[in-house]
Image (spheres, helix red, strand yellow):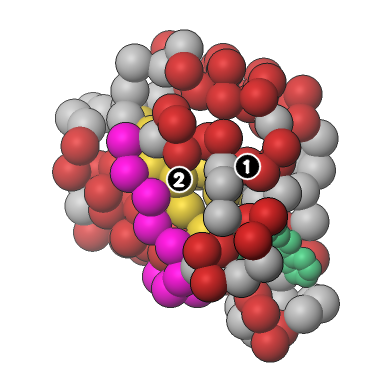
Amino acid sequence: MSKPIYVLSGPNLNLLGVREPQIYGKETLDDVRKACERRAETLGRTIEFRQSNHEGVLIDWVQEARTAASALVINPAGYGHTSIALLDALKTLEVPVVECHLSNPAARETFRRHTYVSLAATGVVSGFGVASYELAVEAAARLSA
Ligand code: CA2
């Protein structure tokens, strides 16, 4: 049995479906979790799905994933654009890292065009709403055992 794929979400994503539906859609983070669980199940895999508004908590979970996860999917949200500490933690992982975003940050404000997290990512999935997470889980499953 493979280790779970960790699926981590960063700050404010707990508000998904509650605020700014025109940008991030109407589905809630619980809907995202269910979609990821369904996709993982079809691939014979399990996920560990978590969200935090706190940089240090996300870093603790990334460190936990070093031994507990087969791969990591992360939507770092705003921390992707700011956090060298999160990048440093991700660089310690030996398992595949898939960065994902609901929107396409490259098509938005210029400050969203750079993410530190991308420097540690095996690949990035952006712009497909909830499907970004599902595709990221699929990519993580294909890249890991
Ligand atoms: O598109 C994405 O998934 C982002 O990671 C979302 C981040 C943003 O800073 C990135 O540039 C792109 C923002 C997450 C905020 O989530 C909210 C959800 C609902 C209502 C308000 C904010």
- Horizontal and vertical percent position of residue 34: 50, 64
Label 1 CB less than 8 angstroms from ligand 1 = yes
Residue shown at 66%/24% (left/top)?
84
Tell me the residue that label 2 is attached to: 99
Quadrant in which ligand 1 is drawn: bottom right
As measured in the structure, the alpha-carbon distance from the residue carrying label 2 to the one carrying label 1 is: 9 Å
Disc number for residue 89:
none
Q: Taking 95 as reference, is 38 above or below it?
A: below
Q: Work out whether mark 2 precedes mark 1 in sequence or the reverse, and give the earlier one.
A: 1
Q: Residue 74: x and y, percent?
A: 52, 43
> Which residues fall within the magenta stretch?
122-131
Residue 30 drawn in magenta: no
Q: Is residue 51 above or below residue 91?
A: below
Q: Which residue position is annotated with label 1?
A: 80
Q: Nearer the viewer, residue 41 or 145?
A: 145
In the rendered image, residue 124 lying in the magenta stretch gets the answer yes
Whether tag 2 and tag 1 are in contact, CB under 8 A, the answer is: yes
**Residue 2 x %, y %:** 26, 29
